[in-house]
Image (cartoon, grey):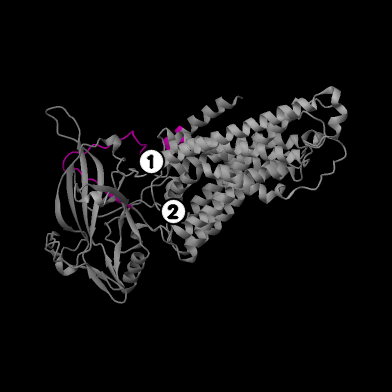
Amino acid sequence: FSFSQERLRCMLVLLLLLHTTDSFYVPGVAPINFHRNDPVEIKAVKLTSSRTQLPYEYYSLPFCQPTKITYKAENLGEVLRGDRIVNTPFQVSMNVEKKCEVLCNFPNKPVTLTVEQSKLIAERIREDYYVHLIADNLPVATRLEFYSNREEEEKKKEKDVQFEHGYRLGFMDGNKFYLHNHLSFILYYHREDVEENQEPTYRVVRFEVIPQSIKLEDLKADEKSTCTLPEATGSAPQEIDPSKENQLLFTYSVHWEESDIKWASRWDTYLTMSDVQIHWFSIINSVVVVFFLSGILSMIIIRTLRKDIANYNKEDDIEDTMEESGWKLVHGDVFRPPQYPMILSSLLGSGIQLFCMILIVIFVAMLGMLSPSSRGALMTTACFLFMFMGVFGGFFAGRLYRTLKGHRWKKGAFCTATLYPGVVFGICFVLNCFIWGKHSSGAVPFPTMVALLCMWFGISLPLVYLGYYFGFRKQPYDNPVRTNQIPRQIPEQRWYMNKFVGILMAGILPFGAMFIELFFIFSAIWENQFYYLFGFLFLVFIILVVSCSQISIVMVYFQLCAEDYRWWWRTFLVSGGSAFYVLIYAIFYFVNKLDIVEFIPSLLYFGYTALMVLSFWLLTGTIGFYAAYMFVRKIYAAVKID
């Protein structure tokens, strides 16, 4: 079967999966029309903090609860992210204003928080938690306004507006804790065009909140659950004293505004990036650097190779050639199978699996099918794709294992299907136990874990076996020269031919091409930002593939010139050198950007970072290995060997 047909089939399967797994709604397909007075349901997603990295569900804190709590059925991605979408008692109707309303069922009877509950709220405020709500699948945002340019402030008072996801649970002043107990919702609607005699329809296009902390005495509530807000200047905030019981009222107000924003572009405000210039600058920078270096490397390598091949192929200078050093001398050993061929082919199989998965996910996301509005779709798609790409991973691993004179294909297939996923599952399971201990919603529930195991052994494993079977039966890769019976002695190597020096040298170029993008990916993962610049990411991915391939070819050329033919494992390790720099960058990011102090959040950060670095090493190592393998076969096919 051809590769392109298979790729097309995968795309179709992926589209079907997106429709089935994401029942919330597929973006761009199902806008909801409201008439005046129609209820607009407000749901809670979770509480998050970039300081602890532990999400909690909304009702883990003593907020007002509706008479019946119902959780939305989640897809795999949402469960893995820690989203637990649940209904709330907020009563919001389309285009109906509310000045101030008490939330809990008792009109003028305040809510009493026990000492335990007060302690918990105070702790969450200290840990800088944010509350995330959604209305019509739009996340709530807090508007932040600041002056863009201080010097010109007098001339024109233009404010820059940015949005913060969710709203702060409360704030601290000195050693005192204050809770945001009044929420002013500002919802924007877009009036749709309808026939003359029809009732107008509206669509929700933005959801903002202004959280306030107002003392119980200042909120005057009456029997009808309505309340009056104090003047802005004279009100005191609602303090939460963790050492005693606290009394307070939870209240909210609703304000509607008409907006020109169409439904299709309602996510734009959440995704406004102040630093698109940085992206373009970094991309252009990377492209220029990579192509400049590529050009130089290609020229040097091609000129040197031409000279080498011309020299080696001069029939009349055979005596001189024998005395020469260089890569031709190791022709009888260059394709000698390495140690542990089964493990090497298994790791490369997993690398191919990752490569196909990442390529398709980024491409599909670039087409806009995995926008942030379809919550969890990206994770779900990535999981399913990794399982289905097992067939490619198995095929390449099986064929390489056969080329390296391996015989035990069943054991090899099992190794391919379990080595990398087993490490990932092991690390995630250990981290999950710690998250369970903290009662966080970020812990993967037991049924989901069983489902993932079933997917691994029910989908991925059989597909890897299938691919491995066909790969192993296929003709092995055609090596252009025969391998000698007796291995040649390797001369003593210079210091710069050391593996670790190679890793440090080879990692710089690919890492330099992508490190700005890495910053945005890290802030998306660790600071609850939206990441949506998949077009940029696709470009960066292409640049990464090109730079990895080239560096790997250069390194393998130097190694063969030094008459060291043990290039199989070394190329795989050295090509993944940029993963070492990713690790260094992750440590730098942890120290400089994140405010994490406790043990468990630090453990989570470094656990997940280890997984990212491992995956990145497999990915870049595989790209480099296949580039180097093709290069070695090409150059030895070009020289005449007696």
Identify the element where label 2 is drawn: helix
Instruction: Tell me where residue 26 sits by quadrant.
Output: top left
Left or right? Give the position of 510 relative to 414: left
Mark yes or no: residue 634 visible.
no
Label placed on residue 526: 2
Disc 1 from disc 2: Cα separation:
22 Å
Left or right? Give the position of 632 relative to 159: right
> Closest to the observer: 335 or 22?
335
Name the image quarter holding the N terminus: top right
- Residue on which disc 1 sits: 277
**Highlighted range, magenta:** 15-44
Front position among marks 1 and 2? 1
Name the image quarter holding the C terminus: top right
On the image, the x and y values in percent for residue 297 come to 62, 34
> Closest to the observer: 550 or 89?
550
Instruction: Tell me where residue 261 sits by quadrant.
Output: top left
> Closest to the observer: 40 or 272?
272
Residue 19 magenta-highlighted: yes
On the image, the x and y values in percent for residue 407 come to 77, 38
Identify the element where label 1 is drawn: helix
Q: Which residue is at 82% across, 34% downward?
A: 324
Say what amino acid the circle numbered 1 marks: Gln
Q: Which residue is at 34% across, 57% downward?
A: 130
Residue farthest toward the top in the current orientation of the protein: 315
On the image, the x and y values in percent for residue 579 come to 58, 48
